[in-house]
Image (tube, grey):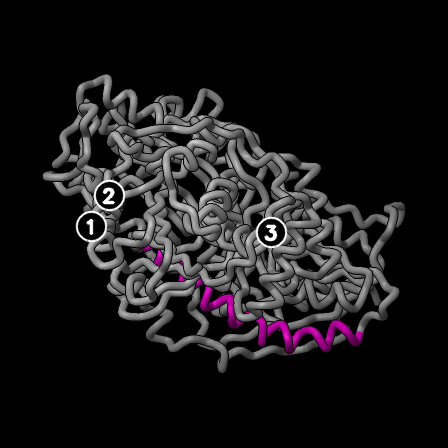
Amino acid sequence: MRIGFFAPCNEFNRQAGPLMGIAYIASYLSEQLGLDDVFLEVDPERLLERKPDLIAISAFSEKYKDVIRAAELFRKVRPEAPLILGGPHISALPHSLHPLIDVGVIGEGEKPMFSLVQHLMQGKELTSSALNEIQNLVYWNPEGELQRTVFEDRIKDLDVLPLPRRDMMKAWWPSLNREVVFDRGVYSSRGCSFRCHFCMYSERANLIRYVSVDKVMEDILQIVANYPEQRHIIFYDDLFVTKKSRLKELADAIRSEKLHQRVSFGCMAKTSFFDAEYAMILRDMNIRVISWGFESGADRVLHYLKDRHSSVRKHQQAVDICNRYGIFSGGYFIVGSSLETYEEMAKTYWFIRKNQPKMPLISVFPLIPLPGTTLWQETQNRGLLDPSFDNWEHLEFLHLDPQHYLHLNENYSLPELKEAYDQHFNPLMQWTTRVFSQVLEYEKMLEPYFKQVLPQLLGLISPQQRVLELGRGDRWLSYELEKHSLFQSQHWTEPLDLSPASENLPDLLVLTHVLEKFGLASSQWQAIQAFEGPVYLLVENSGHLLHLLNLLQGHFPSAVEELEMFKQNYRYTLRSLSKELASQGLQIRQIHPYRLNGQMPAKESVQALLQSMSQVLPLQEFLQDSDVFAYGLLIGRP
């Protein structure tokens, strides 16, 4: 039997997360029934060209019109193929099953699809008596009436499921005229214990079930082995950051396999219980980006959309913690809530502006009442949705078309919302996308730079010596030093004790471009002065690529007095720094110059970037030096 999965998508969900359920179902069918002839398409005509025996559809509500149009085509061209519909829409509104579709699958699809396919493989028809024996279904009986079967509880032990079929996570994208290979992400859990007013999963997925750490590791290792070109893996869990004990166990497992040196990770978290300890655990497993459901910059709106535990103060705290530990923050925001005032919408805008570029990834969406949410019920109670509602394209959240968008706000008009979105929020999203992509490109240039530094450091240590790096989150050098010494890395903002009485003193202290951050008059430097062993300083001038990256990532002071100190630290020359160190009784024993002229982007590209950055960063006083250099300085007491 050949099964074709059809998943109508928009540009937003080209990532694999929303489609991973298909990969799990395909894998389950393969394991249980030996069925491997399964494929995915987002174009109904291409699906028909492959002549499937069964057509399985997965769809969100905003694409349900596309499902119905596709079903008309499927019935016309391949009437013998049963049509089965799953996904968020039919799970939320089983009664909306279209007569062209034979069966709807409610909730998790592995077991119902197994039963349906097994029945067909045995040469039987999908009669009412047969369907009634399968749980979690909605179907049409011979009298033309909708029937629902008993709802089975969700799969409690997720380890019984085989790893998903990631090889099939690709499809021809007609609008792009090319094949799109979806990102290969990981689900380490299913469900979320919170009930957000707008979330389509809140009412059905409140029980969190975890995949065992061993199974998660098997999943990650499979991606790394089969797709070595993929350097970033997303945890698609609704809420990845929950139990600290489990995160620690997973972080230890990732580090024991050295996976943190090979790939970075991204995940979702909630600000209401996030703290520095979580950040340190996530940093250890190389979580590079945390996506937050910030939703609003106003507490009153947050309480309406999420819960009473959410607050702008906690949002800001989470952004600041991530920034301190070298983790990027991604933010999702919602505008247009029914009770939101124009001033509260403005607070959301200024929250984003304030945190640029600490928060380099943002998405702002107009509020949409999705089926299965309490917001959907509220909207019906207000008389804005009648029971026969079928304008599913009105739930598309990528536009504010006055003829389609269902405007819920009671305090400002749709034209006012559209003006704010087009003139203020949309430019913010474009700006962050452009700058963040350039940050990632610039970061790629760090590896060849650190490859120059590494041999000098390896010449100073032996495998049994202890090395402590005081850094700012640069990964490559840390991971290499782990291979060659008893290595520990510490963020430059963390407390530092290097006094002779301290336990486990390092044999070598490495400062990776942090002297420029705190200077020679700081408490951090005073702690370093107490250290009696050798210190290797990596320092840079004001025009250095690393300095530009530092600014792009939001590591710059805001207060005028801090800014003056910051500028002074970046004005160190080799001569002035040598003089300062000598005045403190420190001697430079080795000097290793590193020039990066060949690694820098074109001057025009840098200037264009700085121009776009000038709205949020104090760049005018920086990057005056046309020479780009860094020094490695081995210092110690005479």
Q: Is residue 432 visible?
A: no
Q: What residue would you read off at disc 3?
A: 162
Given the image, on which type of amino acid does mark 2 rest? Leu
Q: Choose the circle earlier in sequence order: 3 or 1.
A: 1
Q: Position of residue 389 (x, y in %)?
A: 19, 30
Q: What residue would you read off at disc 1?
A: 72
The structure residue drawn at horizontal position 54% and vertical position 49%, both measured from the top left corner, is 235
Q: Is residue 250 visible?
A: yes
Given the image, on which type of amino acid does mark 1 rest? Glu
Q: Range of the magenta residues?
A: 431-459
Q: Are marks 2 and 1 in contact (CB under 8 Å)?
A: yes
Q: What residue would you read off at disc 2?
A: 100
Quadrant containing the N terminus is bottom left
Q: Are marks 2 and 3 in contact (CB under 8 Å)?
A: no
The structure residue drawn at horizontal position 38% and vertical position 77%, both measured from the top left corner, is 602
Of residues 19 and 313, the one drawn nearer to the viewer in this rendering: 19
Q: Residues within 10 Å of mark 2 (few under 14, many from 20)?
A: some
Q: CA distance from mark 3 to mark 1?
A: 34 Å
Q: CA distance from mark 2 to mark 3?
A: 32 Å
Q: Are marks 3 and 1 in contact (CB under 8 Å)?
A: no
Helix, strand or loop at label 1? It is helix
- Determine the residue located farthest toward the top in the rendered image: 381
